[in-house]
Every structure is written in structure tokens, then in C-alpha cells.
Amino acid sequence: MANGSRQAAWEFFGAELKRRREDAGFSQSVLGTRVFVSGGYIGQFEQAIRKPQLGVAQRIDAALQTDGFFERMCRKLIDDKRYADYFAAVVQLEALATRICEFAPTLIPGLLQTSEYARAVTVAANPFVTDEYVEEKVTARLERARILKDATRPEYWVVLHENVLYIPVGGPAVMAQQLSQVATLMRERQLLLMVLPYDAGAHAAMVGTLKLMNFEDAPPTAYTETSFSGTLLDDPAVVKRAQRAYDLLRGAALSPEASLALIESAAEDYRRCASTT
């Protein structure tokens, strides 16, 4: 579904939500209370400013007795084939977040990847696909990163394991460009990034990527991912544990200044290597 068609469908979702809410005699506040979000959040759903998580759509169906209508529509709209099934909902949430905290143990996070780095990652994971498939994935990844350029962009905190700097994805030239771009974003204060050094040892969150997302008027959410699957977590107790794990990572990481120096040094090493090959 094209972006314009998808937005029109979300607008239909919102219009239907408003119509059925009013038919049921509920105010936005009353419905919000029944589905565990604020009345303002319901209003933003109705205006297609924000998009509900699947669990909220299911609770709306239960409250309005709509026989799964909003769940089915939500599933269809978050079914974006540019992304893995388990990741499509995360893309929607990233665009709504006021703060994103991310830990990356092996690769530069998707929101920070250059096109060349993203292409190398995609080809490495899918060595037999067509060029069109690769370019579709790369384009989708770069589109996600636009949220960091918006006037209302989220606070973006990143902890990179030192591994990330020394795994030569795409070769020296690609790595030099990628790390230089990260350094530029750090200097422009578009994110706060810290490197977890090798000598920090083991941490509970190191088995895969971890993303924590906070919202203006909805509970925080965590997302974890390993090689072939990802899990969106919204249980408050689990999210609290994930936040604690992230805080421990951040406490063990180098300062932003020391991290920037390390990244720039690695970028320079890759540039020298690229110039001699």
C-alpha cells in the first residue's frame, strides 16, 4: 500500500472510530478510560494524527462491541511488507515516540544507517534476492530515519557496543562513511551516543538489540530483537526491567566525548585502509 493510500486508510479508521464511539454514546474520555489510554489519545486516533497499537484496537472493539472491526483494520494497516512482520508495528511506534533509547550490540541501528551500509547489511542477510528487493529495503530504512529530522523529532539515546565499530560491514570505505555520519550527528547534537567498551564485560541486555520508546500520553514500550525475530513488550513490569537493563548499559558506557573520539578514530583508520586498497 502506498504511503498516501495508507494515510487515507488511517483517516477512515479515525472517522469510523468517531462515528461508532458517538453511536455508543461515549465521550473520548470515557472510551479512553475503557481502553486504558487518555481521551486526548482517542481524539488523535480519530484525527489520524496517531495510530493505535494492535492491543488498543482490540480493546476498542471490546468496548464498542464492533466484532473485531478495528483489530482487522489495524492488522491490515500495519502489515507493511517492506518490513518483517514482527517489525512493522515498531516502525509505527517510532514515529510517535517522544524518546527512543536503543542498544545495538553488533550493527549500526537502522535509524542511523547510510544507504551503503544498509545495502551491505541487506545483501549479507539475503544473498540471493534481486536488486529491486534490496533497494526497497534500503529505501524503507532511510525513510524511517526521517523522524530524526522532523521539528518534533524524539530524543534519541544510543548505546553501541564497541563491536559495532570494528565489524567491517561493506568494507573500509563504507565503514568510514558510516562512522563519519554518526560522528557528524553527534556533533550536531541530534542524538546522544555512548560506546560500551569491551572491558565493560557482560550485561543482561547483550543477547540482542533493545529499543525503549516513550510517548507523550501512552505507556512506554520496549522492543527486543535477535537474528530472526523480534518481540514488542508493553507489560509495565517487563518494560521496567528492560529500562533498568538499559540504564546499567548506559552507566557502564564511555562518556559521549570519549565515545565520539573513539568513533572518529575508527573512521580515520577505515579511511586509511580504504585509500591503500
Image (cartoon, grey):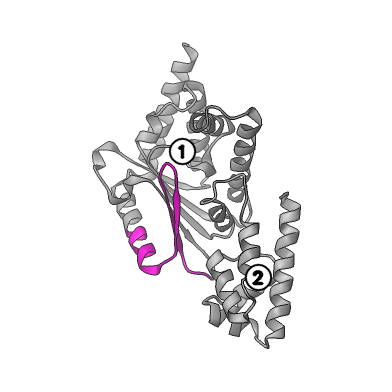
Q: Residue furthest front?
A: 67
Q: Residue at x 63, y 55 (%)?
A: 151
* Nearest-to-viewer mark from 2 and 1: 2
Q: Residue at x 37, y 45 (%)?
A: 208
Relative image position of residue 253 (x, y in whole percent): 32, 45
Q: Residue at x 47, y 21 (%)?
A: 172
Report the span colored magenta: 218-244
Q: Which residue is mark 1?
A: 108
Relative image position of residue 120 (x, y in whole percent): 52, 29
Give the crowd class for mark 1: few <14, some 14-19, many >=20 residues within 10 Å. Answer: many
What is the CA distance from the residue labelled 2 to the residue labelled 1? 39 Å
Q: Which residue is mark 2?
A: 69
Viewer-closest of 66 and 141? 66
Amino acid carrying mark 2 in the image: Phe
Q: Quadrant of residue 37?
A: bottom right
Mark with earlier residue (2, 1): 2
User: In the image, 270: left or right of 43?
Assistant: left
Give the crowd class for mark 2: few <14, some 14-19, many >=20 residues within 10 Å. Answer: some
| Residue 262 shows up from this direction | yes
Relative image position of residue 190 (x, y in whole percent): 53, 47
Q: Is residue 169 above or below residue 277?
A: below
Indicate the secondary structure of the residue bearing disc 1.
loop
